[in-house]
Amino acid sequence: MNLEFIFSKYKVETLQGRYITLNDIAPVLNKLNTENQLAIEGYSVLKNPIYSYQIGAGKIKIFLWSQMHGNESTTTKALFDFLNLLQSNSELAIDLLNHFTFYCLPMVNPDGAKLYTRENANQIDLNRDAQNLTQPESKVLRAYFTKVKPDYCYNLHDQRTIFGVADTGKPATVSFLAPSYNENRDVNEVRTKAIKVIVAMNNALQQYISNQVGRFDDSFNINCIGDTFQSMNVPTILIEAGHYQNDYNREETRKYIFIALLSGFVKLFENDIVNNEIEDYLNIPQNKVVFYDFVYKNVKINYDSNKIITNIAVQFKEVLLDNKINFNAFIAKIGNFDDFFGHFEYYAKEAVFSNKTNTFPKIDDKADFYLNNNIKIENGKMKI
């Protein structure tokens, strides 16, 4: 099965970039609503609708939700690509729809999506509200879970560019977690079901992004939705979309999320799940904070008659301006950090640092400076 070809065929081209809002997905939902599969399950703090979409007639019930964090849109795009496939009447789609019923909340946090924030309009992280259920979005999610009574849950997120695969120097393009259901992080039958699916997805992804799949930390937090559902005896799978090369709009990563989803469902459909799943799961390297967006090494800084040779790390901050995400670069660290990597690295060979103010670089300064007066660093990027 050519998963990349399938993705290219069913990719929803109208959904592009990082800024995905209710206005973007509403036309796609309406187009997919061929047999009244679309419903409104409730409303956000700002009274925006939270849509559900149901498709399929199979016995195994799959519950997927995305954009619980408003600024995490990659998995939303991939979810719509997958739903577009299910509408295709292809042999693959028919098989999946006869075996599964898919229940989706494609955008749990429409207010946060509009504001491009992790939190909702009340500045509450919905993924820490699974027990108290103080927010309308949290209540909608729990009510839909209770109504559906799913056999599997898929908790879809993005993670920052800072994450790598252990100490390999490879970015964590996709990361997985079978959340813990108790403080001891025990593995019971329910969690094992989630682990089996993750292993199947990882095996598929290794063919495309070898050594770029990570395993998220499984510390137990009952306030998180994944831990809660796992503790309620429903196998729950966390998928995190991360960084791939220079793909800051996450269009390549989107493809790998689609491949992960589809390959996992195909393996469930075929009942082709490996037996040594726990060992294979634990062999997926853990995520680790080891990356900056840019690293300039061996830079000479002259200041107050002192000369030092050091490294400068630069990190993007994502800022919403005029309905567009701007990636603004700032100095994040100065010094020696041998255990860190840059998605872009430059060895300066003791090139002399200078900036417009002729001052020593500081943390959170804009990443605009020169090396040897002939190499310009503008917004973190090198321009010669």
Image: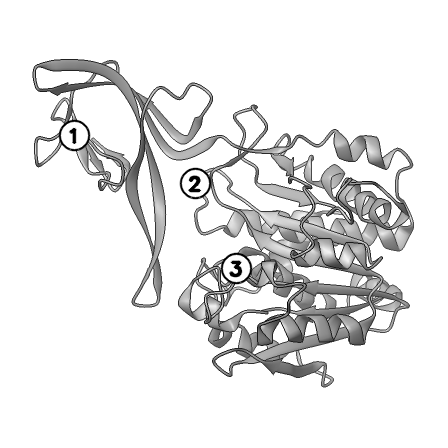
Q: Nearer the viewer, residue 62 or 357?
A: 357
With 100 as the anchor, is 121 left or right in this view? left
Q: Nearer the viewer, residue 95 or 334?
A: 334
| Comparing labels 2 and 1, the label whose residue is closer to the camera | 1
Q: Which residue is mark 2?
A: 246
Say above or below: 203 vs 106.
above
Viewer-nearest residue: 51 or 208: 51
Mark 2 and mark 1 lie on one chain; the one further toward the N terminus is 2
Instruction: Say few, some or many: other residues with alpha carbon within 10 Å of mark 1 (under 14 / 14 to 19 / 20 or more).
Output: many
Secondary element at image label 1: strand
The image quarter containing residue 53 is bottom right
Judged from the image, the secondary structure of the residue bearing numbered disc 2 is: loop
- Distance from disc 1 to disc 3, alpha carbons, whole Å, reads 35 Å
Q: Amino acid at mark 1?
A: Tyr
Distance from the alpha carbon under mark 3 to that under mark 2: 17 Å
Crowding at mark 2 (Cα within 10 Å: few <14, some 14-19, many 20+): few
| Residue of label 1 | 370
Residue to which mark 3 is pinned:
73
Q: Is residue 304 above or below residue 359?
A: above
Q: Residue at x 70, y 46 (%)?
A: 220
**Residue 175 point in image, percent of width and height:** 63, 42
**Residue 1: x percent and y percent?**
77, 47
Q: Nearer the viewer, mark 3 or mark 2?
A: 3
Do the residues bearing badges 2 and 1 touch, measured as CB atoms within 8 Å? no
Mark number, residue 18: none
**Residue at the image point whose x is 43% and y is 70% from the top:** 114
The residue lying at 65 percent from left, 50 percent from top is 239
Q: Quadrant of the C terminus?
A: top left
Q: What's under tag 2, amino acid-wise?
A: Asn
Mark 3 nearby-residue class (10 Å; few <14, some 14–19, many ≥20): many
From the top left corner, tell me how far across and down residue 87 is, in percent: 72, 71
Tell me the kind of residue under disc 3.
Ser
